[in-house]
Amino acid sequence: MPMMIRVPKENRHAESDAVCPVIQGYPKIIEHSDAPLERYGIPMDLPAFHWHNEKLRRRQTVDFITESYGIPAKQALAATKAAETALSSFRAELQTHGRQILDKLNTQDGAEFGVVLAGRPYHSDNLVNHHLSRFFTGLGIPVLTLDGLADLGEVDVRPSRVDSYVPFHTRMLAAALSVAQNPKLELVQIVSFGCGHDAVLSDEMARILSETSNKELLVLKLDEGEASGPLTIRIKSFIETVRTKRGLNTAPEAHELNDTIQANTGPQETQPAPKLADGFPQKFTKADKKRRVILAPNLSPAFTRVSAAVVSRQGYHLEPLPVAGERAFELGKKYVHNDICFPAQVNIGEFLSEIETGRYRSDEVAIGLAKNCDACRAGQYAGLARSALDEAGYKDIPIITVGDDTKNMHPGFRLSPHFQLRMLWALSITDALETMRRRIRPYESRKGEADRVFDVQLERICTGISLGHRDALKGLDAAVDAFNRIPLTVSATGADRKPRVGITGEILMKYHPSANGYIEKYLEEHGMEVVVPGMVDFFRRENVINKHLGNQKLSHYPFLSILLGDAADHVYEFVLRKVDKAMAEFRFAEHRHDVHDLAARIGNILDPSFVSGEGWLIPTEIMQMADDGVHAFVVLNPFGCLPNHISGRGMIKPLKARYPHIQVLSLDYDPDTSFANVENRLQMLVITAREQQRLHAKLSTHAGSAEAQRKISVPKEQFLPVQKEGSTDSV
C-alpha cells in the first residue's frame, strides 16, 4: 500500500504535484493500528513514491519491484510499461464514452442537461459515493465523471483564486471552468466530511460558476452514513431549481474565460461572456510601501514582533496585531468557511477585529499572511482572506504573503535574499528567550517577573535585529544575564523540579496562546513545568528532507537536492552555534537537541519524506522529550487537521509501544471549543503526572536507577472509580 507523496501533474498550468495528506500518510496509520504482520503474519509494503513526472514514476516503480521482490529489472520494466499502456487505454475509453454522452446531449433527442460529478478518485467507488449517479440517471439525467471530460489538462486554471497544488484539486477547478462554458452541463461536488481542502475548493468552484455562468454548485457532503432520504431531497431540489431557471429562459450561457481555455466537452455554439474576474483585484503596489501599514496576525506574539523588526529593515511598516480574543474568533467563524482549519479563522479574525475598532482606515492597511505547505490548507490562506475581506466589506484591502506570489497579489512587495537569514537569526534568538522564560516562570518568587523580563529583552533584541545580528546577539547576552538574576522560590532542580508536560502539535496551536486556550498558563498554575520545542526545527527540517530525497533518488535532481540541503544546513548550524554559545551561560543550560537528533528517531514511525503539516516532527519531538525525562504530553491540533491527525493522534499507538510509561493527550480545537471540556481532560493528565513524579522520587531514593525511573508507570487501578461501601456513588 504505497504512500503517494507526489503524482505527475495532469494540468500543464498547475503549480505543483502534491497529494492529499491522507493519501500520503494513511498507509502508515493502517500499519500501526491494524498491525497485520504481528496479528496475521502478513507484511505490509509501504513504499513512499515521489512521482514528480512519468519518468520518475517508471524508475521508482521498477526500483521498488526489483529491490523488494528480486524480480529482474528487465521484467519489472516490461510490466511497468504494460501497466502504463493499460492505464492510458482505460482513460481513453472513459473519455470516449464521455464524448458520446456530450454528443447526445447536443442532439434534439438529448436530455435537457447533464451532470458532472466532481470529486477525488475514490469518490468514483459506489461504496463511497452511495451509488450517487443513480439519483440522476433515474430521472433521465446523464452523468459524467471528471475522467470522462477530455482535455481538462489543457484548461487554464491560473485565473482561479485557489493555488493549484494538488492534481486532484486542479481537476475540480478545471471542471468548474469547463462546465461554466457548456450550457448543457451542471456541476455537483462530492465532499468528504471534515475535509478542509474541500472547504477551499467548494467556495472557489461556486465563485467560478456564479461569476461566469450564473450556475449554482451543488455540494454533497458524504460520510459512512447510508440514509438516502436527505440526499434524495437535496438532489431533487437542485434538479427542480435548474429546470425552473432553464424554463424561465435564464439558463446559463456558455462562456470563454480566455483564449487558452478550450474544454473538450463536445462541439457546440458558444457566445463570448465576461472572463473570470481577477481573484485578487486589489494589489499591493510600490506606492503602498509608504502609505500602507501591513498588519500581521500572530503565529506567536514573539514571532510576529521579531518578524516586524526584520521586515522593517526593508522599508516596510509592519505591525503585529493584538492576540485574538472572543471577537476575533467570532469574526473568523463568521467570514471563513467553517470546515476550514481553526488557525485560518484565528488569523483572519485577528485582522477583522482590529479593523472593526476603527483605529485604521481600510485604505491605509494591508494584511500580511504566511504561505507554506502545498499539501496543507496553510497554502491557501490568501484566498480565504480575500473571500472574508470581500464579504466583510473590505474589498480595498490588499494581501501580501511571504511565500511565492503566484496570483500577482503584491507586485509592490518583495523581500530580499537577506530576509531569510535575518529571520533565522531572529527566530533562533527568540527560541532561546522562550526556553529561558518557560524554565524560570514556574519557580519565580515574584509572579510575572519572567514575563516582564521576557518582554523587556525581546524589545531590546528587536531593536538589535533592526541593526544587525551582532546587536541581536548582544541583546541575547543581556537577556541571559537578566533571567539568571530572577529570584526563585526553590532550586528548580532535582527533587525541587516540578513535573514536566511537553506540548507539541500544529505550529499555530502550539505557540498561539489564545488559540490553545492559554494552556501553558493553566498547566503552570496547576503545578507543572511546560516544555515546548522551538520553532527553528519546523523550518530546518526541509534541509533534512531534501538530503533524504536526494540520497534516495526521489527528487528531480538528486545531487542538487543534497547540495542545497547541505548548504542551507551549514547556515543554520553557524547561527545556532552562536546562539548556543550565549545560552551556555544560562543557569539552567541544557543540551539543545536539533532537527538531526529528531530525524534519527524516525525509524519505522513515519517515512522521512512525509512532510504535510508538521510531518514527523510531532512523534519525534515526543520521543526526544521522553528520553529527556518528560512523561506527559499534549498534542494540540485544529479540528479536522488531516496531516496532523496522521502524525499526531495516529502515532500515539506506536509511541506508547516504545514508551509505555508516557501519557499522551490529543486535543482538537475549533472556535466553539469549550475549555471546560479541555480542562477535564487536562486534570487527569496533571494528576497522573504528579503521581508519576512522586513514584519517581520514591524509586530514586531506593534504587537510583535511571533506566528504572524511565520505565516506571502509574497503575491504571489508581484512577479507576472506587465504590463506597454500601453506596452506588463513585469516588
Image (cartoon, grey):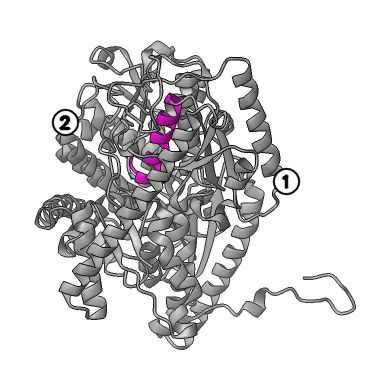
Residue 26 in picture, x, y percent from top left:
43, 62
Where's the N terminus, which quadrant? bottom left
Residue marked by disc 1: 229
Drawn side of residue 413 relative to residue 689, left or right = left
Mark before the other along the chain sequence, 2 or 1: 1
- Residue at (61%, 47%) from the top-left corner? 134
Asked whether 695 or 50 is in front, the reply is 50
Residue that numbered label 2 is attached to: 416
Query: Image height check: is 620 above or below 708?
Result: above
In this picture, which residue range is highlighted in magenta?
A: 164-181
Instruction: Choose between 282 and 599: the one closer to the eye.
Output: 282
Estimate the x, y position of residue 541 in percent, counting from the top left: 26, 55
Q: Is residue 583 above or below residue 462?
A: below
Q: Residues within 10 Å of mark 1 (few under 14, many from 20)?
A: few
Query: Could you say which quadrant of the image residue 174 lies in?
Result: top left
User: Measuring 36% from the left and 47% from the top, which residue is drawn there?
Assistant: 375
Report the amino acid beneath label 1.
Answer: Gly
In the rendered image, the residue lying farthest to the bottom is 703
